[in-house]
Image (spheres, rainbow, N blue to C red):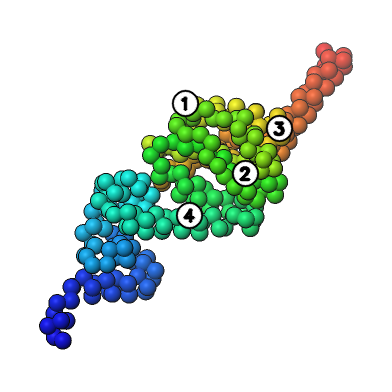
């Protein structure tokens, strides 16, 4: 019995301690490589996986980039088996599903959980190595109906399919849409092409009474909202501004007319 215990690999005791530490505070006090190590040990049962966890963090940059790396990169650069890749991708998918559960299936209007929706877009698109153009559809109460990828490549090169967006919005019976795309460069500052394309889509959809609620640009660590920065205005606010501007112009015209008609002001 003693000889058998001496043959027990050291990493087995380490794994038990790692699990216990994680359960104390759900991993809040653990460095990223240890969280990744905890995942890997369930897919690779008979090996010390700490060196592999550290290697993956070094290769890809952080745990988020590891979980969202392409399957091909995880196999080729990370030297992982399909079994391990499947586990990492399952964890990533669970995280995305958990985030979307806050607003999916008509649970609540999207503006009540707006930051959660932006986080969802960042998880879904932010880690992509090429640009993807997505459209998310909402009913009149701004409840989530679904989303689709309708383009790829940079917006000045992609077809930015306004007719297809309109067609899909009508099929969802969605009076509101949110546009979203990613910037693999990391900077979410919109280009001139991004702004021009957004304006063209807004004008086109307006003809079928579909409103663009926002256009979001995401990267792994940043996001940019056209609505929050005033590039896209709320229609009601825009109409009210136009009404006030018109009233001001009419008032000014009446004042000038009175001045011209009243002799004592000539």
Which residue, given by chain and number where applicable, does mark 1 sit on?
157
Q: Count the marks.
A: 4
Which residue, given by chain and number where applicable, does mark 4 sit on?
96
Residue 71 point in image, percent of width and height = 35, 48
Which residue, given by chain and number where applicable, does mark 2 sit on?
137
Q: Residue furthest left?
A: 3
User: Pointer 1 and pointer 4: residues touching (CB < 8 Å)?
Assistant: no
**Residue count near mark 2 (Cα–Cα under 10 Å), binned few <14, some 14–19, many ≥20:** many
First-in-chain label (1 vs 4)? 4
Q: Label 1 vs label 4: CA separation? A: 29 Å
First-in-chain label (2 vs 4)? 4
Q: Label 2 vs label 1: CA separation? A: 24 Å
The structure residue drawn at horizontal position 57% and vertical position 50%, both measured from the top left corner, is 114
First-in-chain label (4 vs 3)? 4
Residue 70 point in image, percent of width and height = 36, 46
The structure residue drawn at horizontal position 38% and vertical position 39%, both measured from the top left corner, is 129
Q: Which mark is residue 209?
A: none
Residue 206 point in image, percent of width and height = 68, 31
First-in-chain label (2 vs 1)? 2
User: Pointer 4 and pointer 3: residues touching (CB < 8 Å)?
Assistant: no
Q: Residue furthest right?
A: 262
């Amino acid at each position: 019995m003693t000889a058998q215990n001496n043959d027990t690999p050291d990493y087995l005791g380490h794994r038990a301690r790692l699990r216990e530490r994680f359960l104390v505070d759900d991993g809040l006090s653990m460095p990223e490589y240890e969280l990744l190590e905890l995942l890997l040990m369930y897919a690779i049962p008979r090996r010390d996986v700490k060196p592999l966890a550290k290697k993956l963090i070094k290769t890809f940059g952080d745990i988020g980039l590891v979980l969202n790396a392409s399957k091909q990169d995880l196999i080729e650069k990370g030297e992982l088996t399909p079994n391990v890749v499947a586990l990492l991708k399952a964890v990533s998918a669970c995280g995305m599903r958990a985030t979307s559960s806050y607003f999916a299936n008509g649970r609540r209007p999207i503006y009540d959980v707006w930051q959660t929706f932006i986080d969802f877009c960042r998880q879904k698109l932010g880690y992509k190595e090429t640009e993807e153009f997505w459209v998310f559809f909402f009913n009149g109460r701004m409840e989530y109906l679904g989303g689709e990828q309708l383009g790829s490549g940079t917006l000045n090169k992609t077809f930015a399919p306004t007719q297809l967006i309109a067609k899909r919005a009508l099929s969802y019976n969605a009076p509101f849409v949110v546009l979203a795309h990613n910037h693999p460069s990391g900077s979410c500052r919109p280009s001139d092409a991004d702004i021009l394309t957004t304006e063209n889509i807004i004008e086109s959809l307006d003809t079928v009474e579909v409103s663009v609620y926002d256009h979001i640009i995401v990267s792994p660590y940043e996001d940019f909202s056209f609505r929050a920065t005033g590039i896209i205005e709320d229609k009601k606010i825009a109409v009210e501004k136009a009404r006030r501007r018109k009233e001001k112009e009419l008032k000014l015209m009446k004042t000038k007319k009175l001045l011209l008609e009243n002799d004592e002001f000539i």
